[in-house]
Image (cartoon, helix red, strand yellow):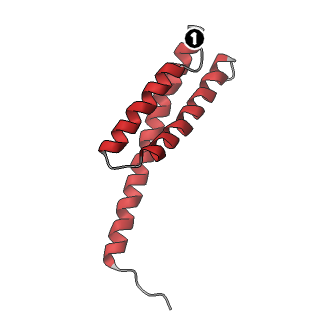
Amino acid sequence: MNTPLPAELVTLRKSIDNIDAALVHLLAERFKTTQQVGHLKAELSMPSSDPAREAAQLARLRELAQGADLDPAFAEKFLSFILAEVIQHHEELAAGEG
């Protein structure tokens, strides 16, 4: 016998589902833009990675996370994961694989 879920839990889960969908769409947009950056860097023979820019972005994200009451260490891990993917894509484009 299944116990019905409380209405509040159902509502909260719907909210989470909507947020997850928004995150996926935002990440897709971000990667579309970084692909354009990667193509431009490849055309200009620029390095795939820009450590100064990446450090600035991580610092900026930590600040934003603190202001949003989100663990800055988590935000940094999240952006680091994304940056690693972006750099890999840029390296593939530079090698003519993309």
Instruction: Say which residue appears at 48% left-offset and 87% top-offset.
Output: 2
Q: Answer left or right for 78 relative to 90.
A: left
Q: Residue at x 49, y 20 (%)?
A: 52
At 48% across and 30% down in the image, what residue appears?
A: 32
For the C terminus, give its image quadrant: top right
Along the line of sight, the residue nearer the viewer: 31 or 77: 77
Q: Secondary structure at mark 1?
A: loop
17 lies above or below 46: below
For residue 61, side relative to residue 8 (left or right): right
Vertical placement of residue 63 versus 17, above or below: above
Q: Is residue 54 above or below residue 79?
A: above
User: Residue flagged by tag 1: what amino acid is it?
Assistant: Met
> Crowding at label 1, few (<14), some or many (≥20) Cα neighbours within 10 Å?
some
Pinpoint residue 85: horizontal percent, then vertical percent. 59, 34
Q: Position of residue 71 (x, y in %)?
A: 41, 49
47 displayed left or right of 22 = right
Q: Where does the image place residue 84, in percent across and percent down from the top left?
A: 59, 33
Task: Check disc 1 and report the residue beneath it.
Answer: 46
Q: To which quarter of the image does residue 87 belong?
A: top right
Among all residues in the image, which is located at the extreme bottom? 1
Identify the residue at horizontal 44%, vertical 35% (top origin): 29
Left or right relative to 32: residue 19: left
